[in-house]
Image (cartoon, rainbow, N blue to C red):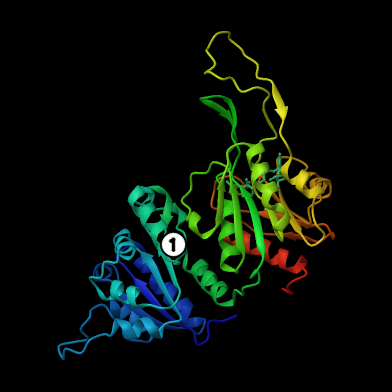
């Protein structure tokens, strides 16, 4: 699909990543989009309007007044003209203004006037991106329904390395194209996702758990929501920023709590995705008081936890679709296929701990999908959001309600 005829406002704010907006403009124009650029005042310190207007083939706006004639750039008209309002890069400053309704330049004024969908691609230094005020503002703008094109990890202009780089222009264009093609294929469908780790208490201060961040499950939850599903999330203890208000959200700690919460809603679900990393064993007894240090070694007796996917798999209704995950370190495909059959999954998504950039915690993953009909699909290393849409495409192909 091209972006032929799509009207896109590209907002450019003050960040070193503004140099990438030139490439982004080229890519969008090449796809056939009409790109109207609006720059914030501080963006002018990073890239010139001349560069961007040459590439977009349109005048670039950065102030309310067009020129000395006094004619104004009508931000209300601009806001109504666009099919999409995309800001890339979005600085911490512009984010703060969007989150709080501050309107002191043409870009912020147009944001407040826009009736079309909004996509925001932040770019900041590592510590800025993690600052609680920025996290809060990101949550706020997402609660307005704005789509976040999450920053990527890598080398930053400061010399530090970590999360904060603006999403690469090629990835942004992919997301924009997906946005315009995405159909409400899950409209009217109820989907349950288990995600994150579980915590099994040893005593009041200690527990057994694992490294799951909940990112893979959240990427699925977000995409399902965008495609019209009613999404139920049963989440173990996670520490990533999420807008829970978009979902039916249940926080749990242990495997047993995750099972109890899931079992109650399972009968009315159309699709269940088991993305949680559930502890297979937990302490047989939870000490009522903090265990005191005494011997050089100590033993904790463990008992098997309930297998949520297996138990609910045995109760699966013929119209329900169950998707499992498998996290393996050896004999990956064989173990994943065995779990597919044993747990009565329709599909299993294998992520290997041996693949760099795959599995726990990171923003990327690399998976193999196996279906009960013998189909196999392999992904490259991609953002978890891209892996999520690939999984949803496979679910649609297996479902009876849509032809993908
Ligand atoms: O959260 P992230 O940091 O983004 O990482 C994503 C992930 C690696 C956690 C995720 O993609 C993943 O692989 N989740 C499943 C991990 C796991 O527990 O795999 P497993 O092979 O042990 O379990 C197989 C399946 O049974 C899984 O769908 C699991 O949710 C389910 N299960 C397992 C044990 C249990 N007691 N109950 C279950 O429901």
Q: Residues within 10 Å of mark 1 (few under 14, many from 20)?
A: some
Residue drawn at (24%, 67%) of the image: 42
Residue depicted at x 54% and y 52%: 363
Secondary structure under badge 1?
helix
Q: Is residue 30 left or right of residue 279?
A: left
Residue 311 screen position, x and y as percent: 77, 44
Residue 353 visible within the image: no
Quadrant of res 386: bottom right
Q: Nearer the viewer, residue 184 or 230?
A: 230
Image quarter where the C terminus lies is bottom right
The quarter of the image that holds ligand 1 is: top right
Residue 194, image x and y in percent? 64, 49
Dot 1 corresponds to which residue?
142
Viewer-nearest residue: 251 or 282: 251
Q: Dividing the picture into quarters, in which one does residue 114 lie?
A: bottom left
Task: From the top left corner, tell me how far across and down residue 204 is, in percent.
Answer: 52, 24
Residue 26 in the image, given as x and y percentages of width and height: 44, 78
Direction left: furthest residue: 68
Which one is in front, 198 or 68? 198
- Determine whether 12 is above or below 372 in the image: below
In the image, residue 26 above or below residue 237: below
């Amino acid at each position: 699909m091209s972006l032929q005829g799509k009207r896109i406002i590209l907002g450019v704010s003050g960040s070193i990543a503004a140099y990438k907006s030139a490439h982004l403009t080229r890519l969008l124009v090449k796809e056939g989009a009409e790109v109207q650029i609006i720059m914030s005042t501080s963006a002018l310190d990073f890239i010139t309007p001349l560069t961007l207007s040459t590439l977009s083939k349109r005048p670039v706006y950065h102030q309310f007044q067009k020129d000395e004639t006094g004619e104004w750039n009508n931000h209300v008209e601009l806001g109504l003209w666009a099919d999409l309002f995309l800001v890339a890069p979005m600085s911490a400053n512009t984010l703060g203004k969007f989150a709080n309704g501050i309107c002191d330049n043409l870009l912020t004024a147009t944001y407040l006037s826009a009736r079309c969908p909004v996509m925001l691609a932040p770019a900041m230094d590592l510590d800025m991106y993690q600052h609680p005020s920025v996290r809060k503002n990101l949550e706020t703008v997402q609660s307005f329904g704005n789509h976040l094109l999450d920053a990527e990890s890598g080398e930053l202009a400061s010399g530090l390395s970590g999360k904060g780089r603006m999403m690469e222009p090629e990835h942004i264009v992919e997301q924009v194209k997906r946005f315009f093609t995405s159909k409400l294929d899950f409209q009217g469908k109820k989907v349950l996702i288990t995600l994150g780790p579980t915590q099994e208490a040893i005593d009041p201060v200690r527990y057994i758990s694992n490294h799951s961040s909940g990112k893979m499950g959240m990427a699925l939850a977000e995409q399902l929501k965008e495609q019209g599903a009613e999404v139920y999330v049963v989440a173990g203890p996670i520490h990533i920023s999420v807008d829970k208000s978009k979902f039916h959200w249940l926080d749990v700690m242990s495997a047993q709590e995750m099972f109890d919460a899931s079992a109650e809603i399972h009968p009315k679900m159309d699709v269940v995705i088991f993305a949680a990393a559930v502890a297979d064993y937990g302490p047989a007894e939870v000490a009522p008081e903090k265990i005191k240090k005494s011997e050089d070694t100590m033993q904790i007796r463990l008992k098997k936890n309930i297998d949520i996917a297996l138990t609910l798999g045995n109760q699966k209704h013929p119209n329900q679709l169950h998707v499992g995950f498998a996290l393996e370190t050896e004999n990956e495909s064989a173990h994943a296929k065995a779990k597919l059959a044993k747990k009565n999954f329709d599909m299993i998504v294998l992520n290997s701990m041996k693949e760099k950039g795959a599995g726990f915690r990171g923003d990327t993953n690399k998976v193999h999908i196996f279906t009960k009909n013998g189909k196999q699909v392999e992904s490259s290393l991609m953002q978890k959001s891209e892996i999520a849409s690939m999984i949803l495409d496979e679910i649609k192909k297996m479902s009876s309600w849509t032809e993908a």
